[in-house]
Amino acid sequence: MFKEYTVEQVVKESRTIKSFYLSPKDGMQVPSYLAGQFVNIKVKPDGSDKELVRSYTLSDKPGATYLRLTVKREEYGKVSAYLHEVITVGGTLLVSDPMGDFHLSVNNQNPLVLISGGVGITPMLSMAEYVFDRQPERQIYFIHSSLNRNVQPMLDRLQYLKTTSNNFKLVIFHSDPLEEELVDIDYDYRGFITQERLPLIGNAEYMVCGPVAFMETVFSFLSEFEIAEDKIHFEFFQSPKTVESKQPIKQGASNGIKVTLVKSQKTLFWQEGAGTLLELVESAGLQPDNSCRMGTCATCQTKLLGGSFQYEPEPFMEPEEGNILICCAIPTSNVEIDL
């Protein structure tokens, strides 16, 4: 269910990132949520023949009188372009209730290690602000990787948390710092996050968010540290695969479930371990519309022309009648889809 929100404030956080402060248009309180959760927004950009839905993490602590979305302007992103170039103060956005399983555990005081790359910083900001405000004795290690100061969001705020709390440790990596950037002021280390710079804390909760290649690298580092897998938590942003490895898909094999792509005139074969229908289609070189890859935005919905399937995981959004969300769908019989 979507509800109208008014844009109360727009803040430019970096050259490519803006924050949008939203309040319910009906004057009611904002819904409660857990630090790290996200919402869906629904927009219809000029020139688009349909409404588009995208998922954005709430980047401020729960309990505020507003919702804050911190959005990177993607080069080919229709929705992010619409937000950055069209939406201004006083505008209206359709916003869902908060949701998502990637969130802060508030039932313990164990140290928290937040590791993010690029715009994956957004859920970490929410978690850090919550702990700073509600659990000031809890130790936080905030480790972030970005290109340089031009695209580094909220560095001033992070440095404030660092100088204000002895329990907040901040480490910033810039892979290509600007000539005018200063070590220990704008960033701590040149290059990418390295294993030796990650804290090894046995009872800590490790939260990781960013591009898939980034998360795979961090996961390998933590695995070598022998950090228990139930202590490592991931959030995906437009991820083409999961961190755990998948079995290769053998195109043309006849010992799998047949998947017929009607428009593309292709026949594929799904086998155990091959992933979702979306992953199967991408392995054939196609690039169907998708965004969240977890059943929260309905961008990937496709008409099912025949056959049966099951969802793994169960999606948050319900597609239109006769459609399926291929980002979550696993075929259980030969299927035909309108791609």
Image (spheres, grey):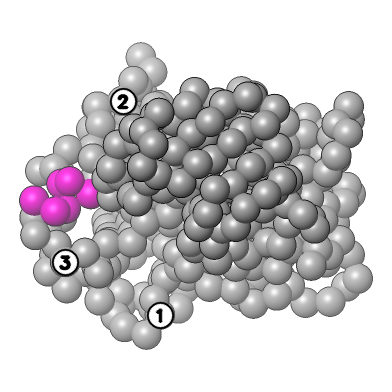
Q: Is the magenta stretch mostly helix, strand or loop?
A: helix
- Residue at the spot x=54%, y=48% of the render? 334
Please tell me how many numbered marks the rendered image carries.
3
Residue 161 position (above or below residue 305): below
Q: Which of 220 and 116 is in front in this view?
A: 220
Residue 228 badge: 3
- Residue at the spot x=45%, y=78% of the render? 134
Say which label, 2 or 3, has the lower sequence index: 2
The image quadrant that residue 337 belongs to is top right
- Residue at the spot x=37%, y=85% of the render? 107
Residue 34 position (above or below residue 296): below
Element class at badge 1: loop
Say which label, 1 or 2, has the lower sequence index: 1
| Residue carrying label 2 | 175
- Is residue 319 left or right of 107 when viewed as pictured? right
Residue 318 image position (x, y, % from top left): 71, 62
Amino acid type at mark 3: Ala
Circle 1 residues within 10 Å: few <14, some 14–19, many ≥20: some
The residues colored magenta run 219-224
Distance (Cα) linking label 2 and label 3: 29 Å
Say which label, 1 or 3, has the lower sequence index: 1
Amino acid type at mark 2: Ser
Camera-nearest label, 1 or 3: 3
